[in-house]
Image: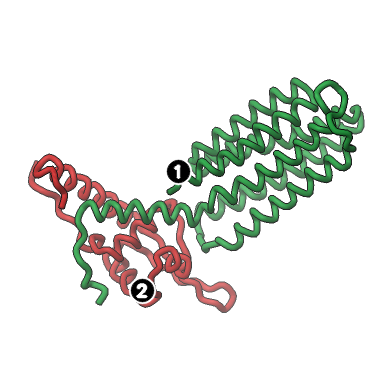
Chain colours: A green, B red
Amino acid sequence: MVENEEPLSPSESLRLIEDQRVATVRRLGGDPLVLYVPWGVAWLGGFGALFLHYGLAGEPIVPISIDLALGVLFTLITAALVISSALNIRRSVKIKGGSAESGMMYGYAWFLAFVTMGVISVRFGQQLPAQERGLLWASTSLMIVSALYMAGAAIWQARPMFWIGAALAVLNTAGTLAGAGWHALLVSVFGGGGFILAGLLLRRRQR
Amino acid sequence: MTGLPQLDPVIHAQARLKVVATLNTLREGDRIAFPGLRDLLGMTAGNLSVHLTKLEDAGYVEIIKTHKGRTPITYVALTHRGRSAFHDYTAAIRQLLESAGTGTNDDN
């Protein structure tokens, strides 16, 4: 019964190959919407709250405490982390070989980089005034995210991922030069907004 | 030009073409667990096994049986030969389409 299929025409063959490739990439790579949008919302809301606390001229725009702003940021980041890892587990099709190893090393790279960053920021942050300390944490975090995005793009040969990392590096540099308030504003609007936009655009391109 | 290219009969069958196209999407050196492949293709296990055996006989796929604890796991990968056969197949298909385009200008 399996052999009694109609022979395919060349154009049908080509279409089948392309459909199958798209379906496989989507299934294994995950939905860009759920990969990017939770992080976009977390940055938009979290760094947005920080910006409202710092303001641009040394005065808060909305009188919220730094603890509240950081609480919003960490809650949203935790939520994004939970959502993305839950989806990672759910769509796990067992694949062994080179890319499984790359993926594992890449995961450990994120973890170790953030541990190192935490130690550096705690150690040197003690010497700094509160705003500068906040900026130290934010800018070193962003540096890791942007560098690992570009490195990840090199591993999986994913150009959009490289451009996201490169854009974050530019944003981080400009924001750090301008100060805590500007940094929070830029990361919130362009970083968070950018992630949301990237999720929507990449999703559209996949179809 | 020496006429139209021949299509590899092992690959030129809907179900096996799907299998090979899917495996070709994986990076070289990667292998996928049987249940994952079955889900990606939406085939029954029996049907997929039949096609995999044909592809294995042609030397296009490699089937690796291992154990995780006591559970047996089967992994499937495209061989070098399978990858280049798929490459040749898509090149032949493109060539056929081009010659159809320059000929009657109608592919149906």
Query: Residue B94: x and y, percent?
Result: 22, 46
Q: Residues within 10 Å of mark 2 (few under 14, many from 20)?
A: some
Give the SS element for disc 2.
helix
Q: Please, what is the three-letter code of the amino acid marked with disc 2?
A: Ser
Rendering quarter of residue B48: bottom left
From the viewer's perspective, is residue B34 above or below residue A191?
Answer: below
Count of numbered circles in the view = 2
- Given the image, on which type of amino acid does mark 1 rest? Arg
CA distance for labels 1 and 2: 33 Å
Whether marks 1 and 2 lie on the same chain: no
Report x, y in % for residue A57.
84, 21
Q: Choose between B49 and A78: the one closer to the eye.
A: A78
Q: Is residue B31 left or right of residue B7?
A: right
The quadrant of the image that shows the N terminus of chain A is bottom left
Q: Residue at x 71, y 34 (%)?
A: A188
| Local SS, label 1 | helix
Query: On the picture, is A121 further left or further right than B51?
Result: right
Residue A165 at what x, y percent from top left? 60, 34
The chain letter under disc 1 is A
The chain under label 2 reads B
x and y percentages locating residue A25 in the rendered image: 45, 52
Residue topped by disc 1: A205
| Tag in front: 1 or 2 | 1
Identity of the residue drawn at 73% across and 30% down: A185
Q: Nearer the viewer, residue A194 or B7?
A: A194
The structure residue drawn at horizontal position 69% and vertical position 24%, both measured from the top left corner, is: A173
Which of the numbered marks, if any, corresponds to residue B49?
2
Q: How many other residues sit within 10 Å of disc 1, few (<14), some (14-19) or many (≥20)?
A: few
Q: Are marks 1 and 2 in contact (CB under 8 Å)?
A: no
Residue shown at 71% from the left, 40% from the top? A43
Find residue A67 and report its image quarter.
top right
**Is residue A80 shown left or right of residue B40?**
right
